[in-house]
Image (cartoon, rainbow, N blue to C red):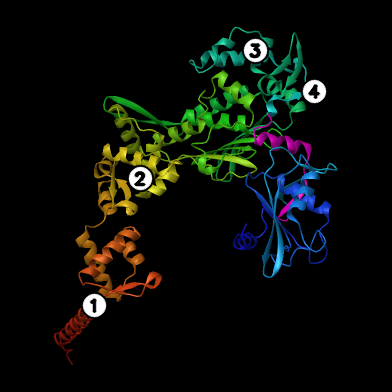
């Protein structure tokens, strides 16, 4: 930590990872200090937290009071925190001078397990009722969620003390076997010949040696009777809603076992999902409003990854132009919006996830997110979105609307030509169709992979004749080829996107300067629809040939016509105005 880094933290204000503790009025006691440390350790973020002593809530630096006679000893403060936290926290303490005052900066690592004070007090960092970060009590059920988010606890494997074997429905066991049988090899066929008790033991739904001794949460979720689920798992609920603007057409809530809910919602999906056909060669290709595989994976993910310690339902909302599937509980630790497509699977309830795979409901590869994106794109729809997700809920949006049938035809034709397009290629082509161009950096962010892989993927599309590069090195960008625009039914878009030839670009710049007196690099880039680097090269060429003169430097730089050229232009303009006045006929009296 440097004074510059400290100033940056203070200027950003208090957050879930940064807390200020001022000592202007009175010194912070050791107990209050330990509670603040524990609070920062128990937070949802997996980045280091900072406690800043000597900074008021409004960001004023008033200085920390000495804790060891006339100074603060970082080693002794670290030992105090380690001795008075359970389990012991290894923090890092620094004393820095800022604005002529001392600030004690304590770096608090994120805890894998809930951390409390030595006298048994547990606090966590959260957003308070006023919308500001605060320390609030850390309850036991929240500790379970905290551990589940980090992969340290499988809530679906916990024993439900009051549950009995009679709370399980034999019909649900038969439903599980039927799903395995109908899964076309996706399920675990070795489970078909087992009795109900053996099946429950094989899935981990019960604790049993010779007989069943306890029922786990998984057993109730898969096979529980409705009244048992209402009584023993009150947080479990699933809603199916059909919304037309502000009008609610369907609003059904279920507390059934999960397999029954999956079958019910898939049946409702099939009844509402429409399909149109296109002819590609001799084949008729169906293009549905929404992909069944994408919907099934999205629904299964919501049921598997939801936080069953939170109140709230899994919502499936069918709007006029989209389907939204949301579930209580944010992304598990390590899963973010910018790594959804590449991070290893991290189920919040691993035992439940395994049961869904063995039933054949989800892919055994555990790459359901890839399936959702791939199916949505290959059906000519915009990419799915998880951008409305937060720490309290995950929200999947499947856009609907009119499908891009020409894009579907292109995907099918490439597959028939033995050049199947993968998810990365579909993501890039979809972006190029909607946004017209992208850079290698943007492509890397889009497919969530390093630039080398993004560049290789773009090069494969170039070799397939689907994409063209433009520019060189850092200024290189990519756009769809003329053949691709023609196949997509928009041949004129290629000319608009490709822009003008260098000679035309030079004429446009010179005409702009003649009209407006000057031009900047940014204005040239906008005028010619090129990157800033390409605009700089264009202006440099004109300057080298004496067509323009550079004035100013750096951000204040601009280009104008040489003095001789400018005087000639003004003279020509005056001559033109004079001649027009002479040629103007006199008004008759």
Lower position in the chain sequence, tag 3 or tag 4: 4
Question: Any mark on residue 199, and which?
Answer: 3
Secondary element at tag 3: helix
Highlighted magenta segment, given as a residue range: 129-153
Residue 182 visible in the displayed image = yes
**CA distance for labels 1 and 3:** 87 Å
Quarter of the image with the C terminus is bottom left
Give the foreground label among 2 and 4.
4
Residue that carries the numbered disc 1 in the rendered image: 562
Residue at 21% x, 72% y is 546
**CA distance for labels 2 and 4:** 56 Å
Question: Any mark on residue 161, and which?
Answer: 4
State yes or no: residue 148 in magenta.
yes
Secondary element at tag 2: helix
Residues tagged 2 and 4 counted as in contact (Cβ below 8 A):
no
Secondary element at tag 1: loop
Secondary element at tag 4: loop
**CA distance for labels 3 and 4:** 21 Å
């Amino acid at each position: 930590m440097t004074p510059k880094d400290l100033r940056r933290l203070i200027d950003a204000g208090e957050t879930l990872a940064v807390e200020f503790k001022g000592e202007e009025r009175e010194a912070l006691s050791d107990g209050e200090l330990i509670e603040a440390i524990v609070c920062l350790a128990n937070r949802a973020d997996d980045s280091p937290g900072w406690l800043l002593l000597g900074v008021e809530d409004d960001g004023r630096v008033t200085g920390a009071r000495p804790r060891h006679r006339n100074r603060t000893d970082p080693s002794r403060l670290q030992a105090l925190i380690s001795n008075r936290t359970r389990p012991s926290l290894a923090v890092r303490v620094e004393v820095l001078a800022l604005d002529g005052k001392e600030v004690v900066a304590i770096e608090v690592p994120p805890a894998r397990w809930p951390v409390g004070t030595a006298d048994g007090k547990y606090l966590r960092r959260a957003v308070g009722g006023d919308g500001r970060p605060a320390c609030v009590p850390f309850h036991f059920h929240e500790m379970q969620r905290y551990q589940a988010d980090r992969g340290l606890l499988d809530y679906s494997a916990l024993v439900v003390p009051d549950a009995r074997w009679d709370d399980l429905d034999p019909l649900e066991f038969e439903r599980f076997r039927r799903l395995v049988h109908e899964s076309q090899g996706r399920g675990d066929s070795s489970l078909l010949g087992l009795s109900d008790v053996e099946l429950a033991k094989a899935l981990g739904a019960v604790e049993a040696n010779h007989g069943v001794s306890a029922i786990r949460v998984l057993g109730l979720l898969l096979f529980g009777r409705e009244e048992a689920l209402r009584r023993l798992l009150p947080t479990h609920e699933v809603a199916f809603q059909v919304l037309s603007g502000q009008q609610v057409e369907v609003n059904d809530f279920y507390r059934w076992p999960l397999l029954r809910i999956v079958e019910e919602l898939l049946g409702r999906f099939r009844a509402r999902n429409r399909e149109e056909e296109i002819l590609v060669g001799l084949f008729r290709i169906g293009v549905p409003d929404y992909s069944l595989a994408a919907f099934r994976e999205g629904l299964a993910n919501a049921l598997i990854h939801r936080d069953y310690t939170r109140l709230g339902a899994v919502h499936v909302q069918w709007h006029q132009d989209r389907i939204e599937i949301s579930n209580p509980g944010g992304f598990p630790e390590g899963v973010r919006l910018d790594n959804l497509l590449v991070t290893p699977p991290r189920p919040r309830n691993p035992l439940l996830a395994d049961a869904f795979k063995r039933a054949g409901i989800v892919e055994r590869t555990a790459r359901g997110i890839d399936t959702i994106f791939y199916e949505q794109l290959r059906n000519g729809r915009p990419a799915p979105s998880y951008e409305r997700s937060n720490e309290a809920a995950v929200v999947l949006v499947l856009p609907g609307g009119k499908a891009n049938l020409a894009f579907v035809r292109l995907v099918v034709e490439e597959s028939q030509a033995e050049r199947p397009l993968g998810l990365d290629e579909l993501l890039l082509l979809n972006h190029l169709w909607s946004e017209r161009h992208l850079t290698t950096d943007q492509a890397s962010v889009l497919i969530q992979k390093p630039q080398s892989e993004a560049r290789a993927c773009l090069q494969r599309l170039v070799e397939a004749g689907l994409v063209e590069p433009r520019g060189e090195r850092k200024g290189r960008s990519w756009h769809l080829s003329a053949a691709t625009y023609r196949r997509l039914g928009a041949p004129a878009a290629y000319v608009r996107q490709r822009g003008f030839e260098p000679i035309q670009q030079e004429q446009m710049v010179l005409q702009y300067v003649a009209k407006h007196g000057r031009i900047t690099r940014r204005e040239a880039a906008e005028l010619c629809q090129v990157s800033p680097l390409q605009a700089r090269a264009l202006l440099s060429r004109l300057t080298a040939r004496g067509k323009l003169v550079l004035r100013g430097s750096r951000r204040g730089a601009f280009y104008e016509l040489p003095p001789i050229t400018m005087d000639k232009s003004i003279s020509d303009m005056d001559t033109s105005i004079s001649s027009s006045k002479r040629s103007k006929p006199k008004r008759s009296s």
